[in-house]
Amino acid sequence: MGNADRAHHADLVYAILNEGSATAQSAVAASWSRSLTHYGLDPDHAPPPQRLTHHEFRTAYDRMEPFVRLAQGTLDRLFQSVGDAGCCVLLTDGEGVPLDRRGMAGDDADFLAVGLWTGMVWSEASEGTNGVGTCIAEGRALTIHREEHFLTRNIGLSCTVAPIWDAQGRQMAALDVSTCRSDLTPAILKLVAAATREAAHRIETHHFRETFRHARILVGPDLGNGPAGLLAVDREDLVIGASRAARLAYGLTDERLLRPFPAEDLLGGDDTRPEQGLVTAERAAVRQALSRSKGNVSAAARLLGISRATMHRKLDRLGIAREG
């Protein structure tokens, strides 16, 4: 990034924010406005990036350690995909503090210089508009590309970030892929964004399955606007948990989930409803269990982790004939 670009960045920020309709028309301008008016930041005059003390970082890490360990394989695979393009991978907590990272040794000096490292604070309140902080503030996947950053010292970065939601549908972390390179094409950045979203979804799914490891997991349909939702169902076919996507798809709230309810309440009804994707998945699971047990209903019920009576109710509801 040239000195001329850096010199004019603050002028660009103020010029856009002075346009009355800019905040309504641009998500970046809305974040710039928060950075200026809500957090009191100055594009050109900001202190060095904030870093947690060793004790503060250990406290933050220990709180999230099981989650960080669970994400290791996915972080490794993501870095294998993007590392050669000069990108680092960061897994942050819900406050925007990177707890784990992957980076090429040859690029690490540049990343450390700009604060893309564990223990740094990338909240919007601290760094203004940036990938991690703005993703957490807005609860959505996004890319903040170079001059879209609020602080002038960050405009050499391109950051693609996706939120990660916990098993109760709350935002718990963010997955960031960032680069200091200026030669990545828009097409490459789109591929990086897709890989980041997919990896975040894998981590989120793994976390949900681990949280409800003693339950059966039903996978909802992909409705075209996001990943399929997950439902956790107990031995009596009662819904005991739902991922954020499932909560949005089926209108489930914490209050509704406090009292387990029959999965049939979501699965039943007209064939035109999108919930029928769950019926299809459930029918397939039941038929596979029957096949593996050679038609023995009791054995199939044990494979599914449900009672024989519940299995019979499923067979009746799903219209699956009993053998013999």
Image: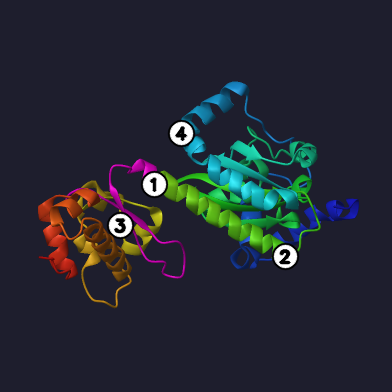
Q: CA distance from mark 4 to mark 3?
A: 27 Å
Q: Which residue in the structure is indicated by mark 3?
A: 252
Q: CA distance from mark 4 to mark 1?
A: 13 Å
Amino acid under label 1? Phe
Label 2 near label 3: C-beta < 8 Å? no
Q: Nearer the viewer, residue 108 or 78?
A: 78
Q: Which residue in the structure is indicated by mark 2?
A: 186
Q: Nearer the viewer, residue 18 or 29?
A: 29
The magenta segment is 209-236
Q: Which residue in the rendered view is the most extreme toward the top?
A: 55
Q: Which mark is residue 208?
A: 1
* Residue 11 coordinates in the image, percent (x, y): 80, 56
Residue at image x 30%, y 54%? 253
Chain-order first, disc 4 or disc 1? 4
Amino acid under label 3? Leu
Is 31 situated left or right of 164 in this image? right
Amino acid under label 4? Pro
Q: Which residue in the structure is indicated by mark 4?
A: 66
Residue at image x 63%, y 41%? 122
